[in-house]
Amino acid sequence: MRDSAKLAVLFAASLVCVLLFIFYDAGSDLSFILPERGAKVAAMVLTGVAVAYSSVIFQTITFNRILTPSVMGFDAVYLFLQTVALFFFGGGGFMMVNEVFNFTVSAASLMLFTFFLYRLVFVRKGNVFFLMLVGVVMWTLFRSLTVFMQMLIDPNEYAIVQDTMFASFNNVRADLIGVSAVIIALVALFCVPMLRKLDVMLLGREHAVNLGISYDVLVKKSLIIITLLVAIPTALVGQMTFLGIIVSNLAYETMKTYKHAYVITCASLFSIIAIAGGQFILERVFYFNITISVIINFAGGIYFIYLLTRESKR
C-alpha cells in the first residue's frame, strides 16, 4: 500500500474515533453536549499533533528513535515550574490564576532549559548513552524536587499541581485551547521549509553540512519548536510521558520512509486515534475509573523496554 493510501486509512480511522466520541450517546439535546465534547476533542487533536511533532523532530536531532522530550525530562521540568509557582505565589496568585501568563512564563523557562541542555548534551555529537544518562538524571532530579516541594505546600493547593501530573481530558483548560491552536498552526507553517532539511539531517552531521545544511542553526530552531510543543499538551491536559515513543515508532514502521512530512502526519493520526479511541473506551467501558495516561504510560513503558532490548541486540 502506498504511503498516501496508508495516511488516508489512518485519517478515516481517526475521524471515526473523533465522531464516535462526540456523538455516541449524545441524546437529542446537543446544545450542552457538543461544546463540552468539542473542547475535549480540540484538546485531543492539539495534544496528538504536538506530541507527534515534538517526538519525531527530537528523534531526528538525537539520531535515536527511543528518545523523546518526555523521556529526557522536559515535561518533568514543566511540572517543577508549576510547583515552584504554586509554592511561592499560592493557588490564588496571578501566575496560577492567569493560565495564558502561566503558560508563557513556563514555556520561556523551559526554553532556557533546552538551551542549557543543548550546550551540555548535544554538542557531544550524539552520544546516545550520554543522552540517556542525562535524561534519566534530569527526570529524577526534577521529579524529586517537585515531590519535595509538594510535601511542603498546603494540601488543598496540592490538587492544583496534581491535575498536571496525570493527563486527563475531563478538565481541559479551555482558555489555552485558542492559544495552543495558534501556536501549533504557526509552528506547522514554520516547519514546512524545515522538513526537507530534517530529511537531510538523517544522513548525519558531516553529510548534512557538506550538503549545505546549517546544522547547529537547524538544531537550535528544532529545540525551540520542541519546547513549545512539549509545553502545550502538558499545560492543556497533563503529562503523557510515553505517548511520543509509541506513535513515532509506529509511524516509522508504518510508512517505511525517511520523509518527515509523511512520518509526522502518520504519527499525528496515530496520536489522535490513541487518545480519542482510548478516552472513548475509558468513559464507556471503565466509567472514568482510570485515566488515559495510566494506560498509555503502562503500554508505552513496556514498548520502551522492548525498544531498548531490540537496540541492544543490534
Image: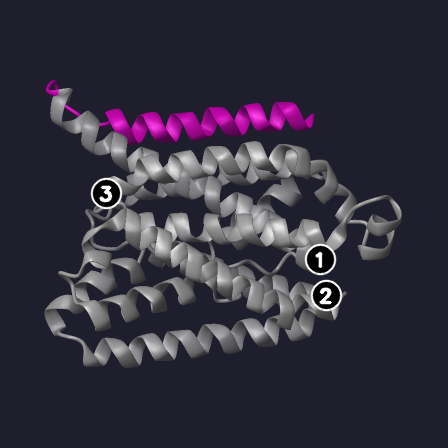
Of circles 3 and 2, the one toward us is: 2
The numbered disc on residue 114 is: none
Between 109 and 39, the one lying in front of the other is: 109
Instruction: Return the residue nearer the eye: 81 or 20.
Output: 81
In the image, the segment drawn in magenta is 1-29
| Three-letter amino acid code at the position of disc 2 | Gly
Amino acid type, label 3: Glu
How many angstroms separate mark 3 from mark 1 (CA)? 38 Å
First of labels 3, 1 by sequence position: 1
Magenta: predominant secondary structure element?
helix
Q: How many marks?
A: 3
List the residue tagged with mark 2: 126
Task: Name the image quarter holding the N terminus.
Answer: top right
Query: Which SS class for mark 1?
Result: loop
Q: Are marks 2 and 1 in contact (CB under 8 Å)?
A: yes
Residue 124 image point, x, y percent:
73, 70
Q: How is the image coloured?
A: one colour
**Considering the image in quadrants, where does the C terminus appear?**
bottom right
Tell me if residue 118 is in the magenta stretch: no
Quarter where residue 295 is shown: bottom left
Residue 227 x, y percent position in the rendering: 50, 54
Residue 283 is labelled as: 3
- Which label is found at residue 63? 1
